[in-house]
Amino acid sequence: MKKFDAVVIGGGPAGTVTAHSLARQNFRVLLIDPTNFQKKSSRKIGESLPAAARPLLRHLELLDVVENGSHSASYGNASAWGQDQLQTQDFILDPNGLGWHLNRTQFETDLRTRAENSGVEIWRTSLLDFENILTPKNSKELRSSRWRLKTDCGMARTPWLIDATGRGAVVARKIGASRTKEDSAMTLFQWFGTSAADTDSRTLVESRPEGWWYTSRLPDHSRVLSLQTDPSLVLELLHSPGLWQKRLKETRHIGATLHRAEPLTELRCVDASSAHLSTFAGDGWLAVGDAALSLDPISSQGLFNAIYTGHKAAQTITNALELAENSELFVRDFQDRLSEIHQAYLRNRRFLYLSEQRWPEEKFWQERHREALLAPEHAAGLRLAR
Ligand SMILES: Cc1cc2nc3c(=O)[nH]c(=O)nc-3n(C[C@H](O)[C@H](O)[C@H](O)COP(=O)(O)OP(=O)(O)OC[C@H]3O[C@@H](n4cnc5c(N)ncnc54)[C@H](O)[C@@H]3O)c2cc1C
């Protein structure tokens, strides 16, 4: 059985940033994730990274991962939200500079390579099982190896476990945290090939009765097309290409952008609901990224949240390993920080959905307005993030 200072389960952006940041402090870190990036099916949706990530990536010495020529600049957003006409938001005015449209697979591959180069041991497999062997009787001597983990690649023990398993939150839920959904939404998505004439690098967003659509041109000259909608519509749209095409044609801006573009993939669907854990951390464990807080894609903050919470988790564990007697305090600070992020996120989300009032009879909008109107405050002055 191998011993580590920390074991990270899940090697998406949140997990790799956590592991990389801890390894840079010379801790022994294990990262467990089965993803094989060579497989086409491993391609994930989620490619816009806002410029606000720039100072954080620089601080983590990871800025080159997004500035290595594999990704393209995002010049802004154009959105028809609350009205038919497009409104534009130009990133040229952003003090952090332009955002990015990522080649997501390359981004994750490079993050993982960086983690490995900084000393992280990687087991390319799934976590099969784990247990906490700490009891009040033996707590002192076993504290440093309280978690015992089982995988196909071997067994490991560690005092710190990080749940970076994305929306599944498999570790935190097994420990006892519950995951609450704030709404229910699904995304239907597909990648298209584009022509050389398609040079619009903005993210285009359009709300419609059935939900909201977006498309972005990606660095490999493909385009992602995505519809966020009510789960009750998904099966029908997924199995009826005619209906999907009809809905796309009914859009005013999105359909025109994809005119003559050829689908490169089948239509796929993923969960896009907002959700949070009942607690983000506990004795000897922390949750990061989507495992802790799953954000609505309209926020375009999922990757930033993954990177930030990964960084914050690494800071927390570094402090706890160096000053073990204060570890409770550091864990509480992590918990409080994520609660603040969650509250700010909810305020933004309510404001955004309340600013679209054209289809009060439609299920997708009714659900979002109901949730928003129950909230004590409707934050003013917040803007569409995507
Ligand atoms: C439709 C849609 C569009 C989006 N668009 C954007 C966008 O434009 N910009 C943005 O910032 N965000 C976007 N997001 C959100 C963003 O993709 C996520 O927030 C981000 O992927 C979270 O990273 P993560 O590392 O927490 O989780 P994930 O990326 O989900 O990674 C989790 C990892 O855990 C691994 N794992 C799971 N279970 C186990 C196990 N038992 N053992 C070992 N490993 C395991 C998985 O293999 C995976 O690699 C979007 C999301 C959706 C649904």
Image (tube, rainbow, N blue to C red):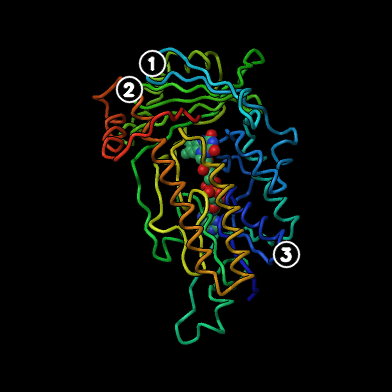
How far is mark 3 from mark 2, CA to CA? 53 Å
Find numbered disc 3 in the image and state the secondary structure of the residue it sits on.
loop
The residue pinned by badge 2 equals 209
Q: Residue at x 52, y 38 (%)?
A: 301
Find numbered disc 1 in the image and state the secondary structure of the residue it sits on.
loop
The residue pinned by badge 3 equals 26
Find numbered disc 2 in the image and state the secondary structure of the residue it sits on.
loop
The N terminus, quarter of image:
bottom right
Q: Residue at x 55, y 47 (%)?
A: 306
- Whether label 1 lies within 8 Å of ligand 1 gets the answer no
How far is mark 1 from mark 2, CA to CA? 12 Å
Indicate which disc residue 179 carries.
none
Q: Are marks 1 and 2 in contact (CB under 8 Å)?
A: no
The residue pinned by badge 1 equals 83
Q: Residue at x 40, y 26 (%)?
A: 212
Q: Amino acid at mark 3?
A: Asn
- 10 Å crowding of disc 3: few (<14), some (14-19), many (20+): some
Find residue 260 and report its horizontal and vertical position in percent: 55, 14
Find residue 315 and report its horizontal and vertical position in percent: 61, 59
- 10 Å crowding of disc 2: few (<14), some (14-19), many (20+): some
Q: Is residue 355 left or right of residue 96?
A: left
The residue positioned farthest toward the bottom in the image shown: 137
Q: Are marks 1 and 3 in contact (CB under 8 Å)?
A: no
Q: Amino acid at mark 1?
A: Gln
In the displayed structure, would residue 166 be above or below residue 213?
below
Which one is earlier in the sequence, the residue at label 1 or at label 2?
A: 1
The residue closer to the viewer here, 201 or 43, is: 201
Which one is earlier in the sequence, the residue at label 3 or at label 2?
A: 3
